[in-house]
Amino acid sequence: MSRTENQSIWSKRQRICFVATNELKINPLNKFKEWKGDMSTTSMESIRKKGILVPLIIREDRIILDGHNRWKSALKMGIEVLPCIIAPQFPNASEEKSFIDSVQNARRQLSKNDWYRMIIRDYGELIRFDRRGKRRVGHLSEDGINDICTTISERSGIPRTTTHQLILKARKHFQYLDVKKGRVSIDYSEIENNRKLYSEYLKAIEERSIIRRRIDSLERKMNKIADVRYFKIHFGKKRK
C-alpha cells in the first residue's frame, strides 16, 4: 500500500471512539519522551480541568501510536475510558515508525537533542553511507535514495533545515568513532598548525561556562521569589 493510499484510508476512517484505559498498550516502536515532575503535574491538572482534548491515536489491537503521556496521566488519575482514533493498518514497521515520528514532531514535543538521538538511532546506517554529491551527478544508491536529508525529514517529520544540521553533526560523530576504532587515520600535522585556533576555542568555552554559572545564579535568586517564567511574562507585558 502506498503512502497516498494509506492517507486516503486514514481520512475516511478518522472517527473518535472510546476505549478502556487499561486495554491500551505501549508501542515498542515509540521511544516517546515521558513527562515527569512539573510536566506530568501540569498534564494531569489540564486533564482534570478540561478533559482529554486531543484523542489518542491507536491501532486496532489497542497499541498506542500517539498519546502515551496522556494515557499514563489518565492511568494515574483513574480515568476509565479515553477518546481514541483508530489508524489504518500500516504495511510495515518502517511506515508505522515514520507515522509515529511525524506526529510527535508535528507537535514539537521533542527537543533538538531528542531529534539528534532519534536520527542516530533510527537512521545511523543511512547516514554512514556517504551520499554527498550523488544527487548532483544524478546517481542513486542501491536503495534508491539520492537525497538523504529529504528522505530522513519526510520519514521523521523533523524540519529539513534541522535535519541537515543534525546529519552534519552525526557524520562528525561517526567519523570520530571510525578514528577511535582505527578504521581511518587523521593527519595531526594540520591540527598542530592550528594550535592558536584551539586555544581560542578553550577560552570561548571557559567564557561560556562563566556566563552559564552567572545565569544559573540569577535564576536561583529569582526562583526564590517566583518561577522565572512569571518574570518573563510580567516584564514582557510591560515592554509591549
Image (tube, helix red, strand yellow):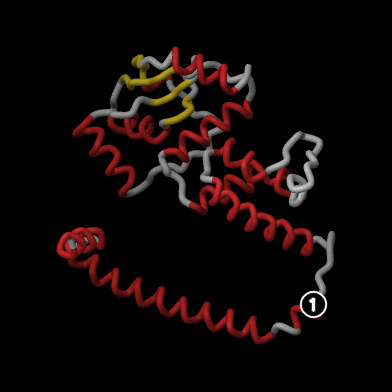
Of residue 58 and residue 12, the one placed in the foreground of this image is 12
Q: Is residue 52 positioned above or below 89 on the image? A: below
Q: Is residue 227 positioned above or below 36 on the image? A: below
Q: Is residue 64 positioned above or below 186 on the image? A: above
Q: Which of the 4 image quarters holds residue 95?
A: top right
Residue appearing at x 46%, y 43% in the figure: 33
Of residue 37 and residue 12, the one placed in the foreground of this image is 12
Tell me if 150 is positioned left or right of 51 in this view: right
Q: Which of the 4 image quarters holds residue 17?
A: top left
Read off the residue under disc 1.
188
Picture quarter with the N terminus: top right
Residue appearing at x 58%, y 79% in the figure: 201
Q: How many marks?
A: 1
Tell me if 214 is positioned left or right of 128 in this view: left
Determine the secondary structure under disc 1: helix
Where is residue 86? Give x, y as percent.
44, 17
Residue appearing at x 52%, y 80% in the figure: 204
Q: Which of the 4 image quarters holds residue 233?
A: bottom left
Q: Amino acid at mark 1?
A: Tyr
